[in-house]
Image (cartoon, rainbow, N blue to C red):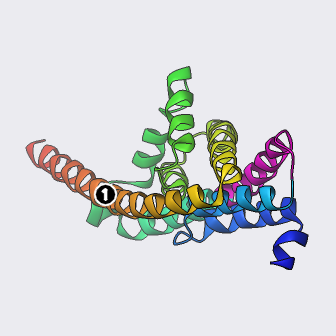
Amino acid sequence: MSFAHSMPLPLFAALASFAEEVIVPIPSGAVLLLIGSLAQLQSYSVPTLVFLAVVATIGKLFGALLIYTISDKAEDVIMTHFSRFFGVTHEDLEKFGQRFGNGWKDYVLLILLRALPIVPSAVVSVGAGVLRIPLRLFIVATVVGSFVRDLLLISIGYGGFATAILLVKHLLGYESVLQIGVVIGLGCALAVYLYFRKRRRHVQ
């Protein structure tokens, strides 16, 4: 308990947010609720929660950029060797990704995906890296959306430790189910896309 009182919370917020973005099994909601609870324990004032959210967002941004870069490079390697098997080339994926970022609707959509607590943040980063959506769109959406999400969850954790525990349980369940759902959904979408693409090539 003494360590909880003396822990350098801004540093913990930055490092924990980075870690939960990079290490997928770590639930982001639980980390942020814990930060809020520790802020209440250390008698942080309500306005300083904004500072903690900013620091957490910075940590999340660096983690997201790392995942974006790794996913982009992994896609390059995989598609270079297996593009014939998938029926989709590296250029096809990048052309699709470049369709994003040309209007305010793309920014709103990606910001919402980042801001919603039940949407796994790492999944968004991986998808953005694979499609190589414009970096400016990725950074803006990550900063704005993550700040909203972080401030909300930190504030909830600050409001009461018991409430935070209950929310952690719900978020763990929702996030796990959503991660599985996203993976299955992307797999099905990819399978359908590849099927119709190969069928169209045979017709031609």
Q: Can you give x and y, in whole percent of width and height, for residue 148 in the image?
A: 65, 38
For the point 47% across and 64% down, which residue is it? 169
Residue found at the far bottom of this picture: 2
Main secondary structure type of the part rendered in magenta: helix
Magenta range is 44-65
The three-letter code of the residue at mark 1 reads Gly
Q: Can you give x and y, in whole percent of width and height, for residue 35 in the image?
A: 73, 60
Based on the picture, tell me whether residue 99 belongs to the magenta stretch. Answer: no
The residue lying toward the viewer, choosing from 149 and 23, is 149
Report whether 88 appears left or right of 114. Answer: left
For the point 59% across and 63% down, which residue is it? 30
| Residue 179 image-quadrant placement | bottom left
- The total number of labels drawn is 1
Residue found at the far top of this picture: 104
* Element carrying mark 1: helix
Q: Which residue is mark 1?
A: 181
Residue 103 appears in the picture as rendered = no
The N terminus - image quarter: bottom right
The residue lying toward the viewer, choosing from 12 and 42, is 42
For the point 40% across and 63% down, which residue is it? 173
The residue lying toward the viewer, choosing from 140 and 21, is 21
| Residue 71 image-quadrant placement | bottom right
Q: Can you give x and y, in whole percent of width and height, for residue 190 in the image?
A: 27, 54
Q: Residues within 10 Å of mark 1 (few under 14, many from 20)?
A: few
The residue lying toward the viewer, choosing from 112 and 9, is 9
Based on the picture, tell me whether residue 60 belongs to the magenta stretch. Answer: yes
In the rendered image of this protein, does residue 19 appear above or below residue 116?
below
Residue 74 appears in the picture as rendered = yes
